[in-house]
Image (cartoon, grey):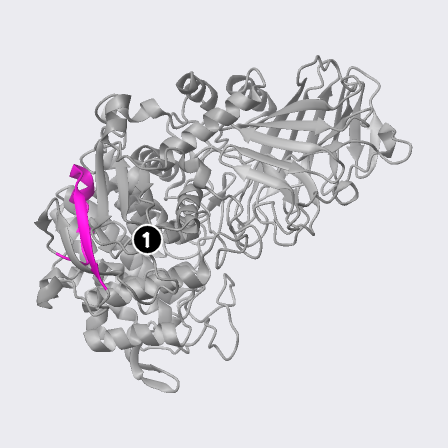
Amino acid sequence: MVLYLLVALLGSVALSSSSSLSFGGDAASRIGKRVDTPIPDPASRVNLFIGTTSSGHAFPGVTLPHGMVKVGMDTDSPDNLAGYDSNPGFNAVGFSQLHDDGTGGSVPLSLFKIWPFASCGDSNTFTSCPTDLNSRKVLRKTLSDGSPDDTAEPGYFASNLSTNIRVELTATRRTALHRYTFPSNATIPRLVVDATNDGQQSSSHPIVHIDSSTGRVTVGATFAASFGPGTYRAYACMDFKGDGFTLGAPSEFGTYLGNSPILGLNDGLQEYTGYRSELGALLGFAQNGDGTTTIFVRAGVSFISTDQACANAEAEIPDFDFDGTRTATRAAWNDLLGRIQVGTDNVDDDTIELFYSSLYRTHISPADYTGENPLWYSDEPYYDSFYCNWDTFRTLFPLMSLHDPENFARIVRGMINIQQHEGWLPECRGATAQHWIQGGSNGDPILGEFFVKYAYQAAALNVSADALYAALLADAEDQPPDWNLQGRQANVWKSTGYIPADLLEAGGANTKQVSRALEYAFGDFAVAQVAKLLNKTDDATKYAGRAANFVNHWNPNTTVPDQEQIVGMMQPRFQNGSFGFTDPRHCSVNDPTGANCFLFNTNFDGFYESSPVVYSQFAPQDTAKLVDLQGGPEAFISRLDFIFDQNYFDATDEPSQQIPFMYHYANAPGHSTNRSRQILFEHFSTATNGLPGNDDSGAMASYAAFYLAGLYPVPATRQYLLSSPFFPSISFFNPAFNSTTTIAVANFAGNPANGAAGTIFVQNVTIDGAPAPSNCFLDWDVFVRGATVELTLTDDMEVTCGGASGNGTDALPPSLSTGGFGF
């Protein structure tokens, strides 16, 4: 019965348990491949409130894995970029159907709020209801510890408002289901349908229609993109039903404009209004006897039309079955989360909670908008909320590779389809609108990551290798009219191998030249990796050569002021080949000017959101070359220590994420373990302020999950850097291979409180009982075939990649300049 509900309720394109059966075996055999663990219900270990205060901007409402609808509470906090703030001092203002997770900038989405009234002022009349956003808001009830009386778990959110109304939420892919329980003194329970208040207050051209015989409300409006120049239009369809009683037609209904409800007098009412006016519907219903009254609101959403919004709702939640929908959504999460299982002996509950909560948030974005693309028709999947690739290419998609090939394949197909219709891969996108590119063409390493891992399964996953490669070449070779929104500043990159700081060229802003060039080089590396797998030898050589062009921005003579031992730095370069100068402290906490290097056209320093000190470490395709440029292994280790000791490392921002693991390349993996564990202990927790910065569409979540797993990915390669997990074992089930790989610790002794010392350093590694070629990385083949990787740990931080012999040169992780990354 649960499987039937899951398939029926989630829609034809949502993830289902049966979708992976084509990769081998039936459901029983798949489950049999998993390692027995004490966590049969990993959804119970998810804390949705992590990162919901301060700047985490995490979304605690309800969604399916990669669902389009993300229904949740909106508060009046100035820091409510996912709608919600768990600080009890902020008011609730509505319950919206659409949100994004962990973004920065302007507030995205937060569309089509529902709001309940138990009464409306002393007179409690229809026209006295305070319908506008600021007038209607109320506080939530609080618990004994002072926290708001809110509950959240995968598939369910609830809140008790100070008006004694209880609100409960659940969802399918394109439809939300609300349950409002009104107190007994609510003689006329009333509900607002807010058509215009998105997160930015940007609506225009709103439409509201009320069917007085059924109470159905349909709305639509146009809204501004939150991180780009465009607009989008969205629609919703709201139906109402009594819980355990016949609700009937609304006893009163009408629209409101601002704070002025207008009682409807005819069979239907439709109204248009101008830009930035608050418009919506207000409906009142007869109370259910003398006790409490519970009313369901079913909210279908569409980016196509109100008719499609209604069709989505009717198809996905036909019977207003709240408990069945909640159960099916939780089952979908458990299917996905349960593919990674951790041992729990001698592990504190907070560590387990942090891991599964992080894994959960990895699967909120991007969102499956299949069937909801108003820009063109296609039978291919359509995904949106790439917000942005610059954040997620490093860790989110490599984590998806380990356990979720079906969704990854669909996302890749959707990206390819966007390239086929718009010319270039999507970079930053929200609600069908293009947003500003943050860095290079970072869709390239995402496609490279998929194909390097699944080249031999691509056809079974319905991904065309030819179309994937054509999409990569479009980014690498063709310069778009506006490379602020898609693609690259490709022409000068191809002709010079760097981005000149003094080149003014139509099509984009003359900013971020150095950081974009470094990311273009990594994108070319991804193209080279795919070309090798496709036996395109000449292309592989060409793009590997372009991947080495990161060195063209390396000035060997630049030093950090007052730190002359740090010699050499990535720097701006002019068309004549000479170097400019950007203070290496720029955009760091040590910057004497306090600059932040955000996305400004007047930002001429050459770097985006991070310092030259940090960006000088970014060449994942050839870290061995960086070691040489920076003076060899000892000098490289000293530079990494300098980055941490002088606070250049920034846990809030993605360019720093790889740095704790870079000691591996200097044959000092124990130092990577030391630093990465300290980062987790210092910056991540299960508290509401437990994220160091924006969750960034799951970028911070996947980052923390990898660190807890004792792994770090090198995207678009077959390597995962290896450290020690925070668990005695961690197992990865992959339905594409029907295999399970377990990393187990032979002598697990727990996790020291400060992360700095203890029996945590990898001394020896075996794979299925045989000595591993390296203590510093695992090859993808280990995860393909299914294996048991056993680690023996020591308290000696000076371990090497080669193990007890101390000669780890041949065991270092691969790099381009050392001939690595073959297949």
Residue pointed to by mark 1: 726
Question: What count of labels does the image hold?
Answer: 1
Q: Measured along the vertical axis of the image, is residue 791 above or below residue 109? A: below
Q: Position of residue 69 (x, y in %)?
A: 53, 33
Q: Residue at x 32, y 47 (%)?
A: 345
Residue found at the very far right of the displayed protein: 123
Q: Position of residue 412 (x, y in %)?
A: 33, 38
Q: Position of residue 645 (x, y in %)?
A: 38, 76
Dot 1 falls on a residue whose secondary structure is: loop
Q: Disc 1 marks which amino acid?
A: Phe
Residue 789 belongs to magenta span? yes
- Residue 503 seen from this side: yes
The residue carrying pointer 1 sits among few (fewer than 14), some (14 to 19) or many (20 or more) residues within 10 Å by Cα, namely many
- Residue 557 seen from this side: no
Instruction: Tell me where residue 222 sits by quadrant.
Output: top right
- Looking at the image, residue 240 sits to the left or right of residue 688; the answer is right
